[in-house]
Image (cartoon, rainbow, N blue to C red):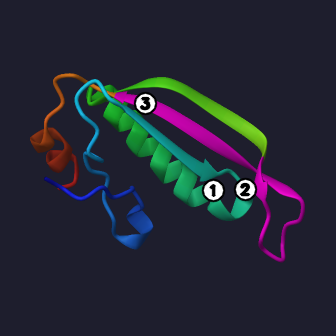
Amino acid sequence: MPKPVMYCRGFGAKLIDLHAVPGGYVCMTTRANASNREYKEELESVLQLMEQTGLWSRVTVLEEDLWEKAVSDQESGYIPGVVYLYRKSVGATHEQFNAMNQ
């Protein structure tokens, strides 16, 4: 069984099954501030591909203006973020996820 790993192309990790059972839910979050824009765009691109191939279906995506407290010197107060809730398709297989990573 694959280890749960988040998607982050820039750092070499790949999107895999995340141990969600068929029909199960996957909830992910990410920052939506300027310094995280590239990661967010890559993540959303892969989520869109997973929807198009039928591996996951979108339940909801919530954008929050005051997501978490800013920790960098370039920002203050709270930064925006996004919550992604998806459902793994009942027929999705490990082989399909692995094929996306090649």
Image disc number at residue 37: 1
Residue 93 point in image, percent of width and height: 13, 35
Q: Amino acid at mark 1?
A: Arg
Give the magenta range: 67-87
Residue 20 point in image, percent of width and height: 29, 38
Residue under pointer 3: 86
Q: Amino acid at mark 3?
A: Tyr
Query: Mark 3 vs mark 1: which is more N-terminal?
Result: 1
Q: Main secondary structure of the magenta part?
A: strand
Residue 44 point in image, percent of width and height: 49, 43
Quarter of the image for the C terminus: give it: bottom left
**Residue farthest to the right, as pictured:** 77
8 vs 92: above or below: below
Say what secondary structure mark 3 lies in: strand
Q: Nearer the viewer, residue 99 or 82?
A: 82
Label 1 neighbour load within 10 Å: few <14, some 14-19, many 20+: few
Q: Give the CA distance from mark 3 to mark 1.
A: 21 Å
* Residue at x-position 32% and y-position 29%: 24
Viewer-nearest of discs 3 and 2: 3
How many callouts does the rendering have? 3
Q: Are marks 3 and 2 in contact (CB under 8 Å)?
A: no
* Residue at x-position 39% and y-position 44%: 46
Say what secondary structure mark 2 lies in: loop
The image quarter containing residue 79 is: bottom right
Going by the image, does 49 lie left or right of 44?
left
